[in-house]
Amino acid sequence: MRLSETQKDQIINELKISAIRSSGPGGQNVNKVNTKIELRFNLNDSAVFTETQKQRLGIKLKNRINSDGVIVLFESSERSQLKNKQQAIAMLVELIERALTPVKRRMKTKPTISSKLKRLEKKKQQSTKKQLRQRPDL
């Protein structure tokens, strides 16, 4: 399920974003600048989703939600705080969209006549090959 732009804006408004020191690449920059982003989204208090959507998100994202019902994400792949912030928001939106997308049910199909015939022909070939490997009757 795709989120609309208004829903994305509402999610962004409800986010709590903080910057912390990163342990990634950057040399001296790492010691001075807070580039790692910690993103928190309180699912229980969110006004964006209905109760059924919240339940579905709670089930699908149970490994990413803490006991308070808050989704916590960390992003530190870039050296820039702004880029990390954008990536963390994009990651959250993608997680939510993937969790809200319903799973397609598999349609049962029958094998075609030609596939049945091919299977039987292959079995016959295998059978004759095995027959030829046996010792001859004397």
Image: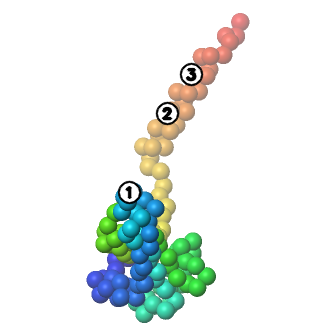
- The residue under label 1 is 27
The location of residue 3, given as percent across then percent down, is 34, 80
Question: Which residue sits at x=52%, y=82%?
Answer: 70
The location of residue 103, given as percent across then percent down, is 47, 70
Observer able to see residue 98: no
* Disc 3 and disc 1 in contact, CB within 8 angstroms: no
Q: In terms of secondary structure, where does tag 1 sit?
A: loop
Observer able to see residue 4: yes
* Disc 1 and disc 2 in contact, CB within 8 angstroms: no
Instruction: Look at label 1 and name its amino acid.
Output: Gly
| Mark 3 or mark 1, earlier in chain | 1
Cα distance between the residues tagged 3 and 2: 12 Å
Marker disc for residue 129: 3
Mark in front: 1 vs 2:
1
Figure quadrant of the N terminus: bottom left
The location of residue 110, given as percent across then percent down, is 48, 55
Q: In terms of secondary structure, where does tag 2 sit?
A: helix
Relative depth, front residue between 111 and 47: 47
Instruction: Look at label 3 and name its amino acid.
Output: Lys
- The residue under label 2 is 121
| Mark 3 or mark 2, earlier in chain | 2
